[in-house]
């Protein structure tokens, strides 16, 4: 895998120039298209799961086997172009032609006649599904008020449990705060108020001027605003949990913000620790040749070419690499990641855990897919969080 380090202004120019010679104009256009997709919030999502049969009376749904549908656990699935949503449970039978799973519930929509859907790790869609008290709040950010859900911790945990102990949840790329609903019950049990935030360009919070992701290079400021908000509400003990790109943003916050000292620990679920490593892996899985990958990264990191991807400014990939910057990490960290994660491979998490064994604990899963660790084994996932929180004292 090619590595891109040093001055991005110079490296990007050299890479783009080499790409023009080696790959030609068509490949350059492809690289720009790839770069644009990386930073553009998705609007259309592929329905890549075939629904073969439904028996609501028996409580089963039969699906075509995919790398996602064959993995044990409980999941959600959108169907009929997101008009409906269902929950599935354990695998009842499977072969190379079909997978029969327990149909737990049709949350909304009509399943009859649906032929395709897309897999989801969310499981819960709305905050009221948890049966826990919550309020809608707004977090003041530098772009305007960003909506958030605030769940109070269990009163049985202490007289000030709901006021003094907070965990702030930051979701990943291309999704919304519903992604983090799975984590609320375990923190509620531990007495933590859970703040599930939105952030720039996620479709709920105010958008930036260019409407493009910064891969954590700017989103961390919305997390900083959430930490400030929690402190103003009386939070004294603060944890932050970041999912996927939310993990990248969390790492940027914890190494760049003046408020990072207010956070006593971070939890990273399937995190992006080094974007170059992740984007090369994703491009390779799509069959893109190395020169195209390098040019795409060069476009995103270039002062003069980042506009081709719709960005108003370049992305500093060196700054986003927390493996190289591991010595700057000062906060106790729990990483939850899986060898089965092909979207954000575990390599970066392994490297960070090796670099900082003094403060980084890695809970390594095997089969679970990207951000699906709770779905695969919720008992182990929640036990890992309980144990780590207890270790903080």
Image (cartoon, rainbow, N blue to C red):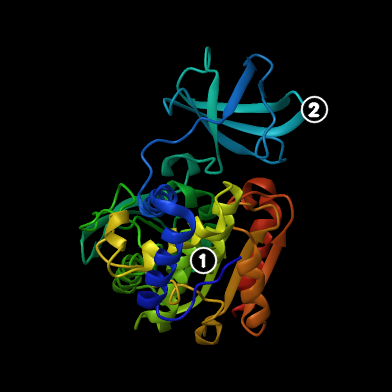
Q: Examine the rendered structure and indicate whether residue 293 appears above or below residue 95.
A: below
Q: Nearer the viewer, residue 47 or 335?
A: 47
Residue 188 rendering spot, x and y as whole percentages: 51, 58
Q: Write the residue at 48% across / 17% down.
A: 110
Q: Is residue 167 left or right of residue 269?
A: left
> Marks 2 and 1, Cα distance to the nearest angstrom?
37 Å
Q: How many marks?
A: 2
Q: Write the residue at 64% across / 71% down.
A: 388
Q: Write the residue at 46% across / 39% down.
A: 125
Chain-order first, disc 2 or disc 1: 2
> How many other residues sit within 10 Å of disc 2, few (<14), some (14-19) or many (≥20)?
few
Q: Is residue 1 left or right of residue 124?
A: right
Q: Nearer the viewer, residue 246 or 73?
A: 246
Residue for badge 2: 95
In the rendered structure, find residue 303 and report the number of the disc placed on it: none
Q: Assess whether mark 1 and mark 2 are in contact (beta carbons under 8 angstroms).
A: no
Residue 77 rendering spot, x and y as whole percentages: 54, 32
Q: Secondary structure at mark 1?
A: helix
Q: Quadrant of the N terminus?
A: bottom right
Q: Is residue 171 visible?
A: yes
Residue 389 rendering spot, x and y as whole percentages: 60, 71
Q: Write the residue at 48% across / 54% down.
A: 23
Q: Secondary structure at mark 2?
A: loop
In the rendered structure, find residue 276 and report the number of the disc placed on it: 1
Q: Examine the rendered structure and indicate whether residue 46 appears above or below residue 189.
A: above
> How many other residues sit within 10 Å of disc 1, few (<14), some (14-19) or many (≥20)?
many
Q: Is residue 328 left or right of residue 39?
A: right
Q: Nearer the viewer, residue 84 or 128?
A: 84
Q: Examine the rendered structure and indicate whether residue 147 appears above or below residue 110.
A: below
């Amino acid at each position: 895998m090619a590595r891109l380090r040093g001055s991005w202004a110079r490296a990007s120019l050299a890479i783009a120039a080499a790409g023009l010679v080696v790959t030609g104009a068509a490949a350059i256009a492809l690289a720009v298209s790839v770069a644009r997709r990386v930073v553009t919030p998705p609007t259309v999502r592929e329905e890549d799961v075939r629904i073969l049969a439904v028996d609501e009376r028996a409580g089963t749904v039969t699906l075509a086997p995919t790398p996602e549908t064959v993995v044990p656990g409980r999941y959600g699935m959108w169907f009929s172009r997101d008009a409906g949503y269902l929950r599935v449970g354990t695998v009842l039978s499977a072969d190379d032609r079909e997978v029969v799973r327990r149909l737990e519930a049709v949350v909304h929509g009509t399943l009859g006649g649906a032929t395709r859907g897309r897999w989801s790790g969310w499981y819960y869609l709305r905050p009221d599904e948890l049966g826990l008290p919550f309020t809608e709040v707004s977090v003041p950010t530098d772009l305007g008020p960003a909506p958030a859900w605030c769940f109070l911790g269990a009163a049985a945990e202490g007289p000030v449990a709901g006021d003094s102990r907070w965990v702030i949840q930051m979701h990943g790329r291309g999704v919304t705060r519903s992604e983090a609903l799975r984590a609320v019950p375990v923190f509620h049990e531990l007495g933590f108020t859970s703040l599930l935030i939105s952030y720039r360009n996620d479709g709920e919070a105010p958008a930036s001027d260019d409407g493009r992701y910064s891969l954590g290079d700017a989103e961390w400021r919305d997390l900083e605003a959430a930490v400030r908000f929690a402190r103003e509400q009386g939070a004294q003990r603060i944890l932050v949990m970041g999912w996927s790109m939310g993990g990248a943003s969390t790492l940027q916050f914890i190494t760049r913000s003046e408020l990072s000292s207010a956070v006593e620990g971070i939890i990273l679920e399937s995190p992006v620790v080094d974007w170059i490593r992740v984007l090369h892996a994703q491009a390779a899985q799509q069959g893109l040749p190395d020169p195209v990958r390098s040019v795409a990264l060069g476009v995103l990191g270039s002062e003069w070419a980042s506009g081709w991807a719709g960005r108003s400014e370049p992305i500093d990939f060196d700054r986003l690499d927390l493996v190289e910057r591991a010595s700057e990490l000062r906060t106790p960290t729990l990483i939850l990641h899986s060898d089965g994660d092909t979207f954000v491979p575990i390599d970066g998490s392994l490297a960070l855990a090796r670099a900082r064994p003094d403060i980084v604990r890695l809970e390594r899963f095997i089969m679970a897919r990207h951000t699906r660790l709770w779905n695969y084994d919720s008992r182990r996932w929640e036990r890992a969080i309980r144990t780590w929180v207890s270790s903080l004292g």
